[in-house]
Image (cartoon, grey):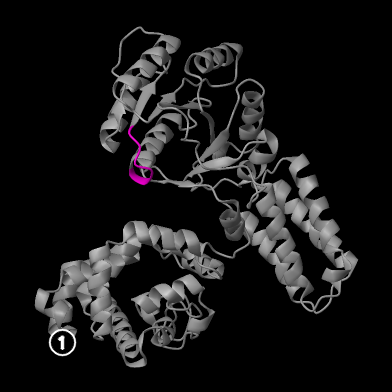
Amino acid sequence: MFDNLSDRLGNVFDKLKGRGALSENDVREAMREVRIALLEADVALPVVRRFIDAVTEKAIGSEVLKSVTPGQQVVKIVNDELVEMLGGTGEDAEPRELNLNAKPPVVIMMVGLQGSGKTTTTAKLGKLLKEKHGKKSMMASLDVNRPAAQEQLKVLGEQVDVATLPIVPGQQPVDIARRAMEAAKLQAADVLLLDTAGRLHVDEALMAEMKAINAVSAPTEVLLVVDSLTGQDAVNVAQSFTGEVPLTGVVLTRMDGDARGGAALSMRYVTGKPVKFAGTGEKLDAIEAFDPSRVAGRILGMGDVVSLVEKAAATIKEEEAEALAKKMAKGEFDLDDLRMQLKQMQNMGGLGALAGMMPGMKKAKAAMQASGMDDKVLLHMDAIIGSMTPKERKLPKLMNAKRKKRVAAGSGTQVQDVNKVLKMHQEMAKAMKQIKKMGGLKGLGALFGKGGMGAAMPGLGGPGGGMGGLPGLGGGGKGPSVDPDTLPADLRDMLNKK
């Protein structure tokens, strides 16, 4: 979503960081470019003015202009202000967690326009509350206007294994809300999620219905669901609801889309309420807590390693990780292990999603797109390994010319593609042996700097045809090495334990 804005800001800051000293005019000129970038990203004008004024005031201070690295200091100030714009962090920031401490059933009321994704988001929250918070939830659809809206929530409830209120044809929203309250109490539900009706636009009838439901159910949380693809219109909708319903937070859907990001950046300032969740896809587990510091890091190209680690923890099976760790300790790594790693990458969102979360990977991601490379590469590699016999996967040295032709024909690829997969395995197997030889973490640099996946991914530059300057994805063994001491302390501890 933030790619265009991120590119524009990246160009501005590259110019600043390339200078040894900055003048006040340099800063003001850079801020003019930042202002244009934000306006083009559809950020609300009052938000842009406030942001630019705050950054300029801090950036032209003597401690910045006279510092050894003024460009870096300006980037830090912009990062801090972006975090503040998105909701802030620390003790002064509004709480973004759902308030689940009220007397059960805790009522969460979902409001928003038709088509914003309320029903799907309701099901996603029900699944999230069950799996991450251990809460027994019930969902009820109060949408009697849209055809099959209640049936849709019932089907979604069955998919996420969350109870839904039985449908009574002809019953009105306020009566459904009362019945839902009683049913939730009888079934000892911890949380009741009310999926209210939407409209194509804000009108008096909609607001009157919202107020009546609010009075009957006394919700602890009133979440406004907004489609982030609608840009500035999303901000206008938020303003309309803010004046009529006591909102407690916002959920931004379709954050994985190609919108310019203005709605996400403007929402907190316009509503005065925190963005609590972001929908990141169509799947029912594609929802994540909205974290201003992480979003700011993505916008400024700093990556989001925390989200990457969380996604890995949620995706990678513990027993598989332990089995691989034991093999790594012995210096072993066969093609079955490589196949397992490829599948885990697919489950985590593919190459593009992973590249977007890693610091300094912005240019690599752009190179991937420019070369036409996508996640089909992972599927092709999986097909190649799947076309081998179990013995060949266990002992790749058996792969002679005749076997390679058979595997290429079986996987619908070329012999050179089979060679690239074998080379990739060879490089990673070498790295595993070095990790064993050098004693755990100290050998990790070998894994990042010896070609790795780049050997199997052509078209992205670099001596070996791989991803060139990318750590761990570099081409032909000439990628840069990574000093393990520069890794975050938590990651170092985790790897040392392994």
Q: Position of residue 28 (x, y in %)?
A: 85, 60
Can I make out residue 190 in this image? yes
> Mark 1 packing: few (<14 Cα in 10 Å), some, or many (20+)?
few
Give above or below for 484 relative to 13. Answer: below
Give above or below for 304 relative to 111. Answer: below
Q: Which region shows up in magenta?
A: 131-136
Question: Along the horizontal axis of the image, is 200 left or right of 134?
Answer: right
On whether residue 483 falls in the magenta region, the answer is no
Can I make out residue 352 in this image? no
Secondary structure under tag 1 reads loop
**As rendered, which of 314 and 390 lies closer to the eye?**
314
Residue type at the position of mark 1: Asn
User: Residue, x 62% and y 28% (percent of image)?
Assistant: 237
Give above or below for 411 relative to 347. Answer: below
Main secondary structure found in the magenta portion: loop
Q: Position of residue 340 (x, y in %)?
A: 25, 68
Q: Position of residue 243 (x, y in %)?
A: 67, 23
Report which quarter residue 244 is drawn in.
top right
Report which quarter residue 154 is drawn in.
top left
Q: In what quadrant of the picture does the C terminus appear?
A: bottom left
Question: Along the horizontal axis of the image, is 374 left or right of 270?
Answer: left
Question: Along the horizontal axis of the image, is 343 left or right of 56?
Answer: left
Q: Position of residue 76 (x, y in %)?
A: 71, 64
Give above or below for 22 relative to 44. Answer: below
Q: Which residue is mark 1?
A: 400
The residue most toward the top is 170
User: Residue, x 22% and y 71% (percent of image)?
Assistant: 384
